[in-house]
Image (cartoon, rainbow, N blue to C red):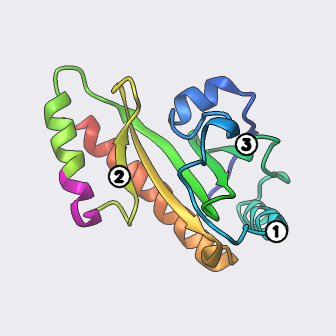
């Protein structure tokens, strides 16, 4: 079971900056490329997040006015961004800093891991725009918002972030 002692919002720029660096453009600048006729039910998202908080023994949490939620789980910052147009939650986290002098090796390793999602539990490894942080990102769709599936996906995600943090540290 995971535990946490902090929940942050989109105004906590320190967490957002270190949380990933993706998906942070204002709503007016993103989403134009996303399609979807059916909108994800805000009530369903609210319920799923409340159930996740209860299961992880966290204080009540919800998406902020920018459709963003940031959770500190034992020092691992997990960012959750809601994309209404795509009917999904984007879940992402910083894995590690890209090792100095090992960029090519790091990027090669990450690209190979992304091929067939080898050891990424279906998530995708990426780098932030400055190419200094390695990130892991996954999505949870409307169909995956029941508690058992969401818990499994979140547990897999946290385990995968920790695995890749250790792996990149070894470079």
Q: Give the number of the disc on residue 47.
A: 1
Mark 3 crowdedness (10 Å alpha carbons): few <14, some 14-19, many ≥20: few
The part of the image, by quadrant, that contains residue 40 is bottom right
The residue range painted magenta reads 112-118
Rendered residue at 18%/46% (across/down):
109
Whole-number angstrom distance, CA of label 3 to CA of label 1: 21 Å
| Residue to which mark 2 is pinned | 163
Measuring from the top left, give residue 25's x and y in whole percent.
Answer: 61, 34
Measuring from the top left, give residue 143's x and y in whole percent.
Answer: 62, 78
Judged by its main secondary structure, the magenta piece is helix
Label located before the other in sequence (1 or 2): 1
Mark 2 crowdedness (10 Å alpha carbons): few <14, some 14-19, many ≥20: some
Judge by depth and name the residue closer to the eye, 56 or 23.
23
| Residue to which mark 3 is pinned | 5
Residue 170 higher or lower than 92, as above or below: above
| Closer mark to the observer between disc 1 and disc 2 | 1
The part of the image, by quadrant, that contains residue 49 is bottom right
Rendered residue at 74%/47% (across/down):
67
Whole-number angstrom distance, CA of label 1 to CA of label 2: 30 Å
Measuring from the top left, give residue 110's x and y in whole percent.
Answer: 24, 47
- Dot 1 falls on a residue whose secondary structure is helix
- Dot 2 falls on a residue whose secondary structure is helix
Judge from the rendering whether residue 35 lies leftward or rightward of residue 135; answer left or right. right
Judge from the rendering whether residue 115 lies leftward or rightward of residue 58; answer left or right. left
């Amino acid at each position: 079971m995971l535990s946490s002692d902090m929940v942050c919002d989109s105004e906590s720029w320190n967490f957002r900056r270190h949380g990933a660096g993706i998906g942070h453009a204002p709503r007016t600048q993103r989403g134009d490329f996303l399609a979807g006729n059916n909108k994800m039910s805000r009530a369903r998202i609210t319920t799923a997040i409340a159930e996740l908080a209860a299961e992880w023994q966290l204080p009540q949490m919800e998406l902020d006015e920018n459709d963003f939620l940031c959770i500190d789980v034992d020092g691992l910052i997990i960012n959750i961004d809601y994309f209404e147009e795509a009917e999904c939650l984007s879940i992402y986290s910083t894995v590690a800093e890209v090792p100095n002098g090992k960029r090519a090796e790091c990027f090669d390793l990450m690209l190979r891991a992304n091929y067939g999602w080898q050891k990424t539990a279906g998530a995708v490894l990426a780098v932030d725009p400055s190419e200094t942080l390695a990130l892991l990102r996954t999505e949870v769709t409307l169909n995956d918002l029941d508690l058992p599936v969401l818990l499994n996906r979140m547990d897999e995600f946290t385990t995968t972030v920790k695995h890749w943090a250790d792996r990149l540290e070894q470079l």
